[in-house]
Amino acid sequence: MNNSVIQYVIHFFQGFPPELTVFILAFLPITEKVALAIGVAGLHLPAWEAFAWVLAGNLVPIVFILGLAERFHIWISKNSGFFGKAWAKTVIHVQYKFSKYQKYELWGLFFFMALPLPINGGITASLIAFILGMPAKKAFPYLLAGVIVSNLITLGVTLGLVKMF
């Protein structure tokens, strides 16, 4: 990530406590994978503290989506007329497209989440769990483990880069 972008983010959140900044960045889909690096390298939080705030921020959308996706799907399908029908048709189409990945199930979800890549965040992984019909109680531990592994990898890279520079 460009140093000027990091400085812009830090400047934008200047009035916020560093812990809240890291939590918010970890919650947002665009910045969730760099929140830990910004917390440690940019805001100079201790690594364990930044890790804890990022973990909390990453888990909020996961819990929210896993808890409400099914209810939202049922409600929108029943109460929204044309949009509800289009929604249901789209979900069925996406489920069909993802059916070839069904064999990987929970371990596939874990590995998807554990890779610290920009698109592999909690929101995407939670939506995949919903689309594949994975029960929230079964998917959550794998998503949690994936978040932890992803952030440990990010932390290792961040600490290595901080020591180098």
Image (cartoon, rainbow, N blue to C red):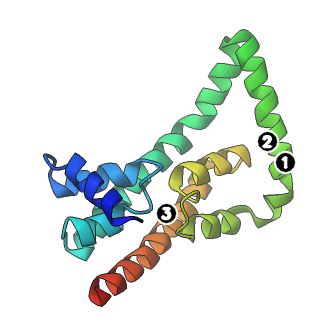
Sequence-first disc among 3 and 1: 1
Q: How far apart are the two marked residues, 3 and 1, measured between alpha carbons? A: 25 Å
Quadrant in the picture for the C terminus: bottom left
Q: Secondary structure at mark 3?
A: helix
Quadrant in the picture for the N terminus: bottom left
Q: In the visual, does 69 lie left or right of 2?
A: right
- Between 128 and 43, the one lying in front of the other is 43
Check disc 3 and give the amino acid type.
Leu
Name the residue tied to disc 3: 144
Residue 89 place in picture, x, y as percent: 82, 28
Check disc 1 and give the amino acid type.
Lys
Decide: few, some or many residues near mark 1? Use Cα within 10 Å; few <14, some 14-19, many ≥20. few
Check disc 2 and give the amino acid type.
Val
Sequence-first disc among 2 and 3: 2
Name the residue tied to disc 1: 97
- Marks 1 and 2: in contact by CB < 8 Å? yes
Q: Nearer the viewer, mark 2 or mark 3?
A: 2
Q: Is residue 81 above or below residue 156?
A: above
Q: In the visual, does 73 lie left or right of 55?
A: right
Q: In the visual, does 65 lie left or right of 9?
A: right
Q: How far apart are the two marked residues, 2 and 1, measured between alpha carbons? A: 5 Å
Disc number placed over residue 48 in the picture, else none = none
Q: Nearer the viewer, mark 3 or mark 1?
A: 1
The quadrant in which residue 58 appears is: bottom left
Q: Secondary structure at mark 2?
A: helix
Name the residue tied to disc 2: 94
Q: Secondary structure at mark 1?
A: helix
Q: Residue at x 54, y 61 (%)?
A: 143
